[in-house]
Image (tube, rainbow, N blue to C red):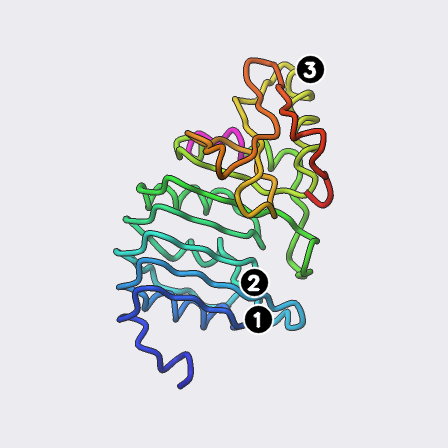
Amino acid sequence: MSLHGLPWSQLKTVVIDVPSSLENIFSYLSQCTSATAVTIHGETPKNPGKTRLPSHRFPAHTLPNLTSLKLSRGCDPLWLLRHFTAPSLQQLEVAILRRDQQVLEDFVKRSPSIHTLIIDERYGEDYAYADEALITDQEIIAYLTSPCLRAIPRVGLDLLYTKKRIPALIQEGLEGGRPLPPLLCWIPENWDQRLVGWWDELDPELHTLLFSYEDGSIELSPEYQIDSDYPF
């Protein structure tokens, strides 16, 4: 059976792990009206056409039962999310291809139940796409200071060289009279990320705190010194 022939509207849990065009991914996801969890894996580094933006418009869709959504860079998450609303969504993980913070914030506003957001900005680590661009310091600051995103209880931004880059931005903000809001940097339980952001309650059994920042002061944990900063 081809993917087009699957009974998408009947599935509760969906995991797609094959390269596909953006049009096909949109078609699959738009039919997942009963799904509570959707994960789209898979990268398409050898076929740039797979991530080429469609030339025609797509209709808006609502996924009423979705509570968990994880989207890889290969499906261009922000292009995809601009077409969807997920009123019951609680957990969102996106790996950014074409960056558009306004699209992300608009989706968050349409999906007000989100309490956990992970944004993967680790460009250049595994795959290369023609449309990707390394995140700038200004774009990092825009994430970390966004009132829309700060309203979400748990947000983690995954960067290359997080441990070096974020303290430098904190220091620049203090010296320039534009201090950043309170931040945490931690290792999640899978140990393959170094997240910066905020979390309403880190679990010491699952998360390893690297440093915290508040009121102009950075406090380093013992793990900060022994943790490798490459490629995180």
Callout 2: few (<14), some (14-19), or many (20+) C-alpha neighbours within 10 Å? many
Say whether residue 171 is left or right of residue 69: right
Where disc 1 sits, the SS reads helix
Q: Amino acid at mark 1?
A: Lys
For residue 74, the mark is: 2
From the top left corner, tell me how far across and down residue 81 is, in percent: 42, 54
C-alpha span from label 2 to label 1: 8 Å
At x 60%, y 18%, the residue is 178
Which residue is under mark 1?
Answer: 50
N-terminal of the pair, mark 3 or mark 2, is 2
N-terminal of the pair, mark 2 or mark 1, is 1
Report the predominant secondary structure element of the magenta stretch: helix
Q: Amino acid at mark 3?
A: Glu
N-terminal of the pair, mark 3 or mark 1, is 1
Q: To which quarter of the image does residue 1 belong?
A: bottom left
Camera-nearest residue between 104 and 192:
192
For residue 218, the mark is: none
